[in-house]
Structures are given as C-alpha cells and as structure tokens.
Image (cartoon, grey):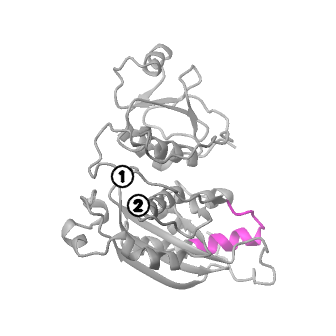
Amino acid sequence: MTMLDDRTTAATWPAAYPQGYAVVDVETTGLARDDRIVSAAVYRLDAQGNVEDHWYTLVNPERDPGPVWIHGLTSDVLAGAPLFPEIAEEFSARLDGRVLVAHNAMFDWQMIAREYARAESAAPVRQRLCTIALSKELSLPLPNHKLESLAAHFGVVQQRAHNALDDARVLAEAFRPSLHAAAERNVRLPLLECRPLTEWASAPAQPRIGYQASYRTNGWRPSRKRPACPYPNPGRYESNKPLKQGMRVAFSGDTSVDRELLEDRTVEAGLHVATSVSRLTSLLVTNDPDSATSKTVKAKAFGTPVVDEAAYTQLLRDVAPADA
C-alpha cells in the first residue's frame, strides 16, 4: 500500500471536486423495495475528506427487523427508537449540500429516497459517489470490492462490521486517502445523479417470497435506458468460479428481491443485463428452472448455466474485473 501525504493541498486541489461529502451507511430489514431502514449513520467531511462530525440513530421500521444475525438489532431494541419521519429533518441537515458517499451507493440512496418518499418529503441530495466505483477508477489492487478489503488496503481497522456507525467510520477513513489519490492524479470522480422519489405506494408490511414489487402498476419506477456495458463478454459463467465483468446475465420469473434493485446491482458490478437468452448469454438467474418460460427453455437448449437468486446475490459480492 502506498501511504499518501498532504502534498495535494487546497492550492492544487481540482476545482471541479465537490465542496463537502456525507459518508453514509444504513442497515435495513432487507434488500427489497418495501424494506425499511433500522439504523443510519453519517460522517460529514470537508472538501478534502477531513471529518467534521458524525451522527447516528436507530430507526423503528414498524415491522420485523429482518436479518438480526447481520445487524444485531432486535425488535426489542428498535421498539423505542424514533420513526423515520421523526429523524428525517436531522438526517437532511447532515446531507444538505453534500455529495452522498457510500459503499454500493446505489443501494443506500434508494433506501434513503424511499424512506423520504414514505414521509412525503425528499432528501436534499443531488449527487452520490460509490466508493466501489472510485476504487475501480483508481485501479486499487483489491482482491474483491468488499468494504473490509478497501479498509485493509488503507490500514483502517473494522471494529463492528454491519454496525452503521462503525461502517460509516471505516468508509470515511478509507475515503479520504482514496480522494487524495484521485486529486493527485486529477481523476474525474464517478459522480452520479440522485433522483428523489416523487410518490410512494404502500405495500404489504411482510414481503412475500416470489412477489415482484417492481411489477406493481401503482408503484414508482423510473423509466430509463441502461448504459451499455463497457466490458467485452468473457463467455459463460463456470461453476465454483467468480462472475467476471462483461458477462451477460438474464433473469426469468419472480424474485424475492425487487427486480429493479437486482438489475441495478448487476449493472453496478460491471455486468450486462440481457433481456433475452441466446448462445452469448453467460448466466440465467431463476428461482424456477423447471418452468416453461422462453428463457428457461432456451437456456436448456443452449446449455446456458443456471443459478437461483440466492446463489446469484452471493456471486455479486465478488465479481472479478474484466481482462485487461
């Protein structure tokens, strides 16, 4: 690891860089559109990544807390916590005028935007920066894109993984040297637009397995064309090996995680979302491989590898970079 010094000062700092950042982590009841935030933390940083202050809160999700074995927050712990509308104003004050920074920022932003939409409000965020994308821009020699790997690269010690406050601290400490490395090389930061939700349609408190929330006709879903995958197709997925950037992934049937979120995570990982199955398809994701949909029928005919949703979400955690 190369230790960075402070040679990149305000005098040589790229003028196009943001003037402040809000490093955010949220823990949730799950990954679907109708899941809720159970805790949130924000580290406010100045233009050069120095910590100004931090804030943390529990949030009563008004439902089952979900994977307690991950975030450690039980129903009893959350029972007396404030509801999201009660902390929305303070949360906004921490975000206002800053770029939201998170590890897999698309997920954190969508969860935050949905909570504000339920509260009939909007978060004062216009741009976000994903530290996974930044590490790729910097070509950091990481074994994978987990937060713990980024932290280890910069010598940051994790104390309580999946605790929102500690995850935000770790990310803030790893983001500063990343930001300085980018500034020294005048790297363009991978900033993306944050579009707030403008409406929200309530859904069942308990998501149902196989229920596709994004197919609701009265819910919110942005209409957008996905950018083309920048990586060449490396071929088919091979069992017991990682996915590789550029692979063409198709989805068939219902998924327990919101399909839009699953597809967004696929694109963020550098994979191509295929709308049909062909001989070029690297992988088909389906929870019902024996169904007679056109995609599963073609997958069998072409010998396309098939995995279920649970296996695929595990594979998404460690996608191998594209060949140079």
Q: Which mark is residue 202?
A: 1
Residue 303 or 30: which is nearer the viewer?
A: 30
Q: What x and y, as percent, mark residue 280? A: 59, 24
| Quadrant hosting residue 96 | bottom right
Q: Is residue 10 above or below residue 132?
A: below
Asked if disc 1 and disc 2 are in contact, CB closer than 8 Å, the reply is yes
The spot of residue 187 in percent (x, y) is: 75, 64
Tag on residue 118? 2
Circle 1 SS class: loop
Q: What is the magenta segment's predominant secondary structure? A: helix
| Residue 310 against residue 66 in the figure, above or below | above
Q: Residue at x 55, y 26 (%)?
A: 281
Element at badge 2? Answer: helix
What numbered label is drawn on residue 182?
none
Where in the figure is residue 81, as x and y percent of width and height? Answer: 28, 75
| Residue plotted at (32% across, 58% down) | 29
Residue 18 seen in the current view: yes
- For the residue pair 201 and 178, the one nearer the viewer reads as 201
- Residue interval drawn in magenta: 175-190
Residue at the extreme left: 76
Q: Which residue is depicted at the point 32% across and 71% down?
A: 83
Distance from the alpha carbon under mark 1 to that under mark 2: 8 Å
Which residue appears at 55% of the width and 80% of the height? 44
- In the rendered structure, which amino acid carries the disc numbered 2? Arg
Image quarter in which the C terminus is found: top right
Q: In screen coordinates, is 146 left or right of 81? A: right
Whether 281 is drawn above or below 97: the answer is above
Within the magenta stretch, is there residue 162? no
Coordinates of residue 103 in the picture (x, y in percent): 52, 62
Instruction: Point out the residue furthest to the bottom here.
Output: 52
- N-terminal-most mark, 1 or 2: 2
